[in-house]
Image (tube, grey):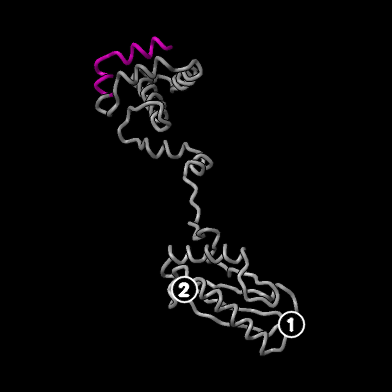
Amino acid sequence: MRDRLGNTLMTEDIEALLESRGIDPAAVRARMDSLTDAELEQIAEHIDQLPAGGGFFETFLIVIFLVFVVLLFTDITGYTDVFPFVNKQAAANSSRSPAAVKTSQPIQTAPSRSVSGTNPDGPLIVYFNSNSNDLTAKAYERLDGVALFMTKNPQTRITVIGFSDATGTSSYDQMVAEVRANTVKNYLIAKGVAPSKISTAADGTHAASNQTNSRVEIEFK
C-alpha cells in the first residue's frame, strides 16, 4: 500500500494538482513515507469502501483528501509547516497549559511605602513612662524613622495626638497630653521636618490608669 501511494504521487499530473492546491509535493511524499501502519490501514479501508466501479480517480481523490487532512492536522499542532494559512502562533498558545501561562508571568506585589520601619498605613505609637514627658530610647528610635520617612515623602502631613492616663485631675491629664504631643513635634522639627507639616492634638480624658494611655499617636495623611 505504501509503494502504491508513493508511485501515485510521483506522477507529474498529481504533483501539478497538489501545487495548484498550495500543497508542496515533497512535503506530501515525506508525510506519506512517515505514515504509520494504522494510518495506511485507514486509507485502505476507505479505498475498499468505494462503490463498485470506482476507478483510479475516485481512489486518488480519497487518498489526497486523507493526506490533506493529516497534513492540516500536523500543521495546526506545529509538527509540520506546509500550509501558510494555518495560524501556528494561535496553535502554539493553545498548547500551553493555564498553569504554565500563570507561572510564566512575573508576580506583581504592591509597592511598600514603609521606610525604616515606619508604615504610614496606620498610626505610629510612641510610649512614655507614666507621669513623664521625656522621650525614651525606644521613642527616639521610632521618631528618627518618622523623620526619615517625612524626608523621603515630603508631600506627607502628620497629626501628633498626645494621651495621658488618669493619674491626676482632668486639667492636669490634659496638660500632660498636650506637652507630650508638643515634645514629639519639637523633636521632629529638630530632625528636619517642616513645622507646617505637623499638627497637634491632645486627649487627657481617660478613665483607666495604665501605661498604654501614656502615649502619643502619629497619624499620616
Badge 1 element:
loop
User: Residue at 58% across / 68% down in the picture?
Assistant: 124
Q: Which residues are magenta?
A: 1-18
Badge 2 element:
loop
User: Residue at 52% across / 72% down in the picture?
Assistant: 187
State which quadrant residue 43 falls in: top left
Q: Amino acid at mark 1?
A: Thr
Residue in the foreground of this view, choosing between 31 and 190: 190
Location of mark 2 (residue): 157
Look at the image and say whether residue 167 sits in the magenta stretch: no
Q: Which mark is residue 167?
A: 1
- Neighbours of disc 1 within 10 Å: few (<14), some (14-19), many (20+): some
State which quadrant residue 57 falls in: top left
User: Residue at 65% across / 72% down in the picture?
Assistant: 128
In this view, 89 is above or below 161: above
Q: Position of residue 81 (x, y in %)?
A: 34, 28
Look at the image and say whether residue 3 sits in the magenta stretch: yes
Q: Earlier in the sequence, mark 2 or mark 1?
A: 2
